[in-house]
């Protein structure tokens, strides 16, 4: 396997994981925010 291709795949996976994590955190924050609004 080509090392460059391997590194690119690894980097892509890393970036995707970061983005997914960020979106997940944001969605949790939004749902908490909405719940707070409903509570009040």
Image: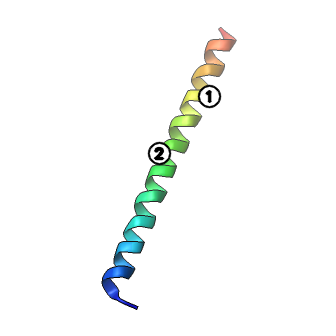
Is residue 21 placed above or below 6 in the rendered structure? above
Where's residue 36, x and y in %? Answer: 62, 17
For label 2, the crowd category at 10 Å Cα-Cα, with few meaning under 14, some 14 to 19 and many 20 or more, is few
The residue at the point 61 percent across, 13 percent down is: 37
> Which structural element holds mark 2?
helix
The answer to whether residue 8 is left or right of residue 32 is left
* Vertical arrangement, residue 29 with respect to residue 18, above or below: above
Query: Does residue 5 appear left or right of residue 28 in this picture?
Result: left
**Alpha carbons under labels 1 and 2: distance apart:** 14 Å
Residue identifier under label 2:
22
Mark 1–mark 2 CB contact (< 8 Å): no
Instruction: Establish if 25 lies above or below 29.
Output: below
Q: Residue visible at 44% across and 54% down?
A: 18
Image location (x, y in percent) of residue 10 = 41, 73
Q: Earlier along the polypeptide chain: callout 1 or callout 2?
A: 2
Which of these two is toward me, 40 or 13?
Answer: 13
Residue 40 placement: quadrant: top right
Q: Residue furthest bottom?
A: 1
- Residue position for label 1: 31
Q: Secondary structure at mark 1?
A: helix
């Amino acid at each position: 396997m080509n090392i460059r291709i391997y590194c690119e795949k690894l980097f892509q996976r890393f970036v995707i994981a970061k983005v997914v994590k960020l979106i997940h955190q944001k969605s949790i924050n939004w749902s908490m925010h909405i719940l707070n609004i409903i509570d009040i």
